[in-house]
Amino acid sequence: MIGSWFQLKFHTRFQVSEYIEHDEHGPSVGIVKKRFLHLDGLTLDNGQNLASATIAYEMYGRLNSRKNNVVLICHALTGDCHVAGYYSREDSKPGWWEFMVGPGKGIDTDRYCVICSNVLGSCMGSSGPASINHRTKTPYGLKFPLITIGDMVSAQKVLLDHLGVQKILAVVGGSVGGMQVLEWSIRFPDRVATAIPIATTPRHSALAIAFNEVGRQAIMADPNWNQGDYYSKKPPDLGLAVARMIGHITYLSDESMRLKFGRRLQAKSDFSYNFEADFQVESYLHYQGKKFVERFDANSFLYITKAADYYDLGREHGAGSIVDAFAKSRARYLLISFTSDWLYPTYQSREMIKAMKKSGLEVSFCEIEAGWGHDAFLLPNEKLTSMIAGFLNNAFSEIDSH
């Protein structure tokens, strides 16, 4: 059952960026602002109703008069809608895809109107388990309904409807964001001209599900988790940190860890002969876990990983067959994978390519040589940037000429 939405509360305006020049990757979209759309209710794929919801989003560039220049970006598991730019002149950290999105960049904001919303279930502005339940005046916790990748996409559709966008030039995203790209192209085929799924999969492997479950169990084993009811108490920081450490390993590769850390010790000349972090890689993982608990909610981690594990393109749209699922799509695709990605390895992209071709779809594919593992799509890569730029340029030139 595809989620239905109703009763938009109020209109939000496009934001105008102020250009700044201190970005290391070239001209930036400048100072940006996170915006919010509030809804009076929604029905989810599982049939449950969420009485109210908020969608956080950002926009860069301008919508043209024909409203045919929209690029929708879908973020990954623990990401957010802050794709590019800065929140203030004092802000030292730009958006997570700053090297890709901006004036003259791979996704050129001088040409395209770029939109990204925070997914349902998150804690970065959109409604999730940490949000206040207006009926009880307390955080939802585990009373927040389980959400799906489809629910995330339906929420994005409502946002675009609200902004007056009926046709999307391209939907782009990596990892769990790539799942959303696939879902968009099949759930709403009349809305999507092109799709760029990066480092993603039509369904999680047993390996990916296993790592997610270990992370969830680490959170739930933390005595502070308290069945998800911890918002007025000490949160399950230790469990969430361990979950992040586990997940972060899957985003890297053997080569990247060997080159970055090897067996080097952390500011020591010999082993401590206790259980301190002797090795640099241990210290690095501890740091990643500590930083993560400062910005993310443990329950949101549970919800979003579960949504990713549930996702199965063939089961949802093709009676078990991804060929039948892709037969519903009308989009042109650019699929990109990375040689060192062992979380969503290239064979999963090749499986999709075969299914797309059997369904008569136009598809381009590139496996990029990169040693940094699954997270390679988040790192500056000239080939990745030029491929996306070229694909978008060709698509927009063709669409705009009609």
Image (cartoon, helix red, strand yellow):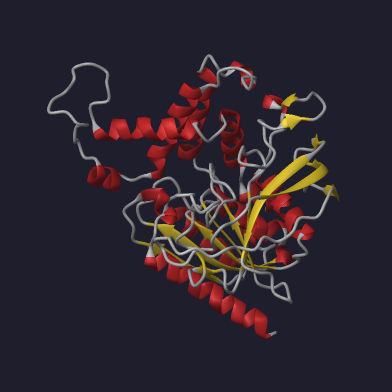
Question: Measuring 57% from the left and 39% from the top, which residue is drawn there?
Answer: 309
Relative to 208, 43 lies left or right: right
Q: Is residue 158 above or below residue 363?
A: above
Instruction: Specify the farthest residue to the front.
Output: 90
Most foreground residue, 155 or 359: 155
* Residue 396 x %, y %: 61, 77
Most foreground residue, 187 or 293: 293
* Residue 358 x %, y %: 58, 66
Q: Quadrant of residue 170?
A: bottom right
Q: Quadrant of residue 44?
A: top right
* Residue 120 x %, y %: 67, 42
Question: Measuring 48% from the left and 50% from the top, which residue is drawn there?
Answer: 90
Most foreground residue, 137 or 384: 137
Question: Measuring 62% from the left and 82% from the top, which residue is drawn there?
Answer: 398
Instruction: Specify the farthest residue to the right.
Output: 7
Q: Quadrant of residue 246?
A: top left
Instruction: Specify the farthest residue to the left.
Output: 269
Q: Is residue 118 above or below residue 213?
A: below
Instruction: Please state, as top left, top right, bottom left or bottom right, where the N terminus lies in the image.
Output: top right
Instruction: Specify the farthest residue to the top.
Output: 223
Relative to 160, 82 lies left or right: left
Instruction: Please state, as top left, top right, bottom left or bottom right, where the C terminus lies in the image.
Output: bottom right
Relative to 370, 356 lies left or right: right
